[in-house]
Image: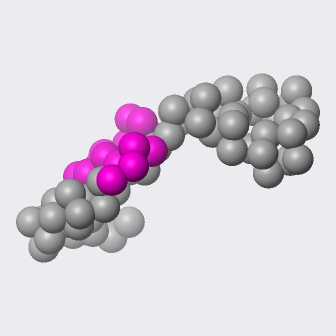
Amino acid sequence: LPEGAIRILVTADLGTILERFTSRMHGNLPAPVKAMLERKHGCFDGEMHHIHVTDSKGQVEEVCRQIRSLL
């Protein structure tokens, strides 16, 4: 990202990600896909960010407030 960009890290816990992929694959999550998701989960957690958004509901207003405060 260019200098001065606001960096927002958006994450979900592994259980939520596995649920979502299983649903998208009509209830059948192949073992190689599951293994890849488990291996890659958290790979961006160490990246520099200004705001961290989790999969929790009801954060929209708070995230918008945080973004506005950084502008």
Query: Residue 62: x, y in percent?
Result: 20, 57
Point 45% across, 44% down: residue? 55
Point 86% across, 39% down: residue? 27
Q: Quadrant of the N terminus?
A: bottom left
User: Left or right: where does residue 4 sit relative to residue 12?
Assistant: left
Point 23% across, 52% down: residue? 50
Query: Residue 39: x, y in percent?
Result: 67, 27
- In depth, the one of 50 and 12 nearer the eye is 12
User: Left or right: where does residue 31 sit relative to residue 17?
Assistant: right
Query: Residue 34: x, y in percent?
Result: 78, 30
Image quadrant of residue 14?
A: top right
Question: Per the image, is 68 magenta?
Answer: no
Q: Quadrant of the C terminus?
A: bottom left
- In depth, the one of 26 and 3 nearer the eye is 26
Query: Residue 43: x, y in percent?
Result: 53, 35
Specify the segment rendered in magenta.
44-58
